[in-house]
Image (cartoon, rainbow, N blue to C red):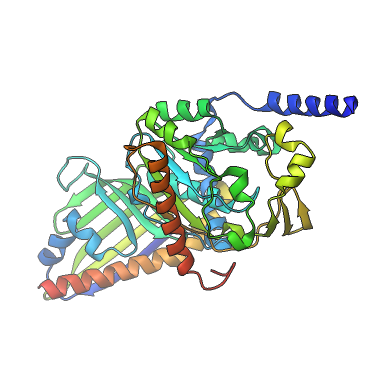
Amino acid sequence: MAGLAEALEWAREQITSRVPKADLDQRDPDYIRDQLPGTWLLASLYFRADVQHLDRIPAEGPVLLIGNHSGGNVPPDTFVFTLAFCSYFGVERPFYQLAHNLVVSAPPLGWLRKFGTVAANPENARLALESGAALLIYPGGDYEVFRPSWERHTVDFDGRMGYVKLAREAGVPIVPVASVGGQESALFLNRGQWLAKLLRADKILRLKSIPISLALPWGLNISDLAGHIPLPTKISIEVQHPIEVDGDDQAVHDKVMASLQAGVDRLAARRRFPVIG
Amino acid sequence: MRVERRNVIEADRDAVWKIVSDPDRYPSFMTRLERWETANDQPPGVGARYFVHWKIGSVPVGGLIELVEFDDLRDLAWVGITGVNLRGRIRLRDAGESQTKVTFRLSYQAPGGILGYIADRVAVGQVGRIAADTLKRLKELVESSG
């Protein structure tokens, strides 16, 4: 048992030490510009994406974008929205996204840092907003992104509302970003929180879920750590009106949730079939 | 890629120029326009800048443009400053009595090497339709207000 504990501790240290320190300078606008045509092709032809109301995002200054998250470890909504934001406001406008430690520390995903992806922690979030950038956060994180596919149109942050405090302290508005379609990129069956606890992944890797899904090319996919090939599901995104942080945390959080859920319901109502859209 | 569409409007050049030289009128005839905003305080003319985005494929494509030609009753041309490399031109010429031939050209080039080239090819059909529809709506607008 002592050997197992040591091995787990070693794994934790290996991952923690690989999480890059907050360095906003790693974002590379020229690199993003060069990648836009490829992402545009993927978004337009494969995901038939549709992004609406980007004009609701304040044209300049720092802003906190709060989205509902879907698609497991290959979330199409994130890259479609990043493409849309960079196309609309230009790669010149600083834009960062918070992601799980495992994502930013994985060597094959190093290129994400050039897109402005930084490790999800309050320090990085504050740093980004203080620099005047737009910041995209998915508060639901791994809890929401692995919800069962039959709950695909439910916004669920698991009660997390630290983002409200962040927006209040930075003095920035919150803009909810609603999306649908991502949870149809595979058949997500179970969050696997019981499995995460059993394997102590919640303690070691900050993973509260080890999800179970049916996904290409694996068939039965446990953990989704190696990702999967998403089905060509239609991604629809609708930016909501900005919300000023002028009440207590719970009241603001409730407004954000209501706005997001209403947006998701609207988008879901226009959807006739799963995947096809 | 370069896309060019032409049509003939049953109105003299003055009437057509009055509309194409007025930036406020663009949202009323330019197709699939997602964003059209003045970006500096300059009146319409060389040096005036605008944010322009067309919905092409999944997202708005465009950026900051600047007028580089503003030749009364003849030519209006712009270049893209941010976003994809872009040049555009609206060209007016006489086509007969009380008729104006309007040419709308858009030249664009996405960055990103081979993927940029493929994206350009994929988008060309939609850009062509935007140019054709824009001219059709311009014709309707001019002829209905004449």
Image quadrant of residue A151? bottom right
Seen in the picture, residue B95 relative to A116 is either above or below; the reply is below
Quadrant of the snapshot with the N terminus of chain A: top right
* Residue closest to the eye, A246 or A45: A246
Residue at horizontal 41 percent and vertical 53 percent from the top: A258
Describe residue A122's horizontal placement relative to residue A186 as left or right: left
Residue beneath the point at 46% across and 68% down: A269
The residue at 50%/40% (across/down) is A137
Number of on-image labels: 0
Which residue is found at the position 11% from the left and 72% from the top?
B145
Residue B53 on image: x %, y %: 35, 53
Vertical side of A217 occupied by A122: above or below: above
Whether residue A152 can be seen here: yes
Which of the pair B135/B52 is nearer the observer?
Answer: B52
Q: In which quarter of the image is residue B74?
A: bottom left
Q: Can residue B84 be seen in this view?
A: no
Q: Position of residue A169 (x, y in %)?
A: 39, 28
